[in-house]
Image (cartoon, rainbow, N blue to C red):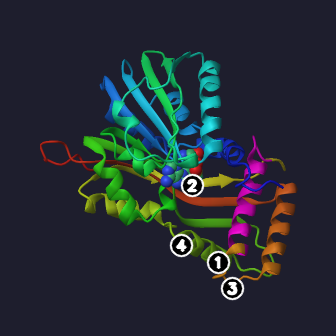
Amino acid sequence: MPSLEDDYPRYLASKRSVDDRAVNERVLRQLATELEGRTRLDVLVLGGGIGRGLERLLEREVLPVNADIACTLVDLRESNVEAARERLPEWAGSQGHTVTELGENHGRPADLDTGTAEGKSGQEERGPHLRIEAGSRTVDVEVLLADAFSVVERGEWDLLVGGAFLDLFDLSEALPRLLRALAPGGYCYFPITFDGGTIFEPAIEGLAPDRLENAFHAHIDDGGDSRAGRHLLTRLPREGSSVLAAGSSDWVVRARDGAYPAEEARFLRYIVDTVADALTENEETDLGEGILARWRERRHEQIERGELLYIAHQLDVLGQVEEADGTGSKSG
Ligand SMILES: C[S@@+](CC[C@H](N)C(=O)[O-])C[C@H]1O[C@@H](n2cnc3c(N)ncnc32)[C@H](O)[C@@H]1O
């Protein structure tokens, strides 16, 4: 069984239908309304994975019409960056959009070629620019292999998008760094932000659900934030920004007539293995290897039978930094 670490792009592909269902449409529509009328937009997608977040913004017509949009996707993981570079033109073609390869160093922001080198062998890897013409929207896309925090500081972004991203960091450090990089009045959109709920049903003998959940969340909190969603809601105003919209985007994965849709059985196998691996490797947890091995086995059997229900509690949050005149942004 390949672990998530072995094939991260495959994991991200397997969660596509789960995310598509979960994303909060009200928050997404609010973002679309905020961006209406913009003729130029610089967007940075943080931890962009295989590019699905950008695809969704186009599919759901969130990016403004008649606009010239520059979109940089940045991810630390080489396999994701390669997959995004391969997938995006294919996806755009499948949608009937016109796709043009523009070569390297084509798009803005131009100052992206300076700054800290990151990525494999210490070098930041820039990729070819891709122009996607989706109706009256022109989107120039570059996928960068780099640390999002070094790239973010080099631009003045109109929109930051971080899907399933913020729980990986200590919010008190990460959020101010991200917000500082926004242009006055700029937006941050954080969909699928984990918010401290991991539910597996039906229960399994020998391991109380709370015990596993608490241990898993403690593992996330070692460097990250298992309640990033709610912390984001309280932290944005403290950082002088407004919460324009927020709503839940829980993953709810269940079989219909004994079978999981799309690639969701695979997705569940990745989730179960990720939890079991994390806790097996974690010396802090008092869950023994034997208990975890049995838990993993039972959960895999439940997936085979179409019995496993998995719910993760998450929030989508849309924020805005102050306008240039300091009057503050709208709150909601
Ligand atoms: C849970 S995945 C989410 C991917 C994608 N946003 C999505 O929603 O499908 C988190 C992503 O963040 C990337 N990542 C983690 N830390 C990063 C960093 N410091 N800079 C850039 N990418 C990072 C990982 O490689 C991974 O692709």
The residue that label 4 is drawn on is 222
Q: CA distance from mark 4 to mark 1?
A: 18 Å
Q: Is residue 113 left or right of residue 200?
A: left
| Quadrant, the N terminus | bottom right
The residue that label 1 is drawn on is 210
- Residue drawn at (68%, 41%) of the image: 13
Residue 174 screen position, x and y as percent: 39, 59
Who comes first in sequence, dot 3 or dot 2?
A: 2
**Ligand 1: does it lie within 8 Å of the C-beta at label 4?**
no
Looking at the image, residue 207 lies above or below residue 254: below
Outermost bottom residue: 286
Q: CA distance from mark 4 to mark 3?
A: 16 Å
Q: CA distance from mark 1 to mark 3?
A: 13 Å
Check disc 3 and give the amino acid type. Answer: Asp
Who comes first in sequence, dot 1 or dot 3?
A: 1
Q: Which of the two marks, 4 or 3, is nearer to us in this view?
A: 4
- Say if residue 296 shows up in the picture: yes
Magenta stretch containing residue 223, yes or no? no
Name the image quarter holding residue 90.
top right
Q: Residues within 10 Å of mark 3 (few under 14, many from 20)?
A: few
Q: Which one is nearer the viewer's eye here, 34 or 282?
A: 282
Q: CA distance from mark 2 to mark 1?
A: 18 Å
Q: Residues within 10 Å of mark 4 (few under 14, many from 20)?
A: few
- Label 4: state its secondary structure: loop
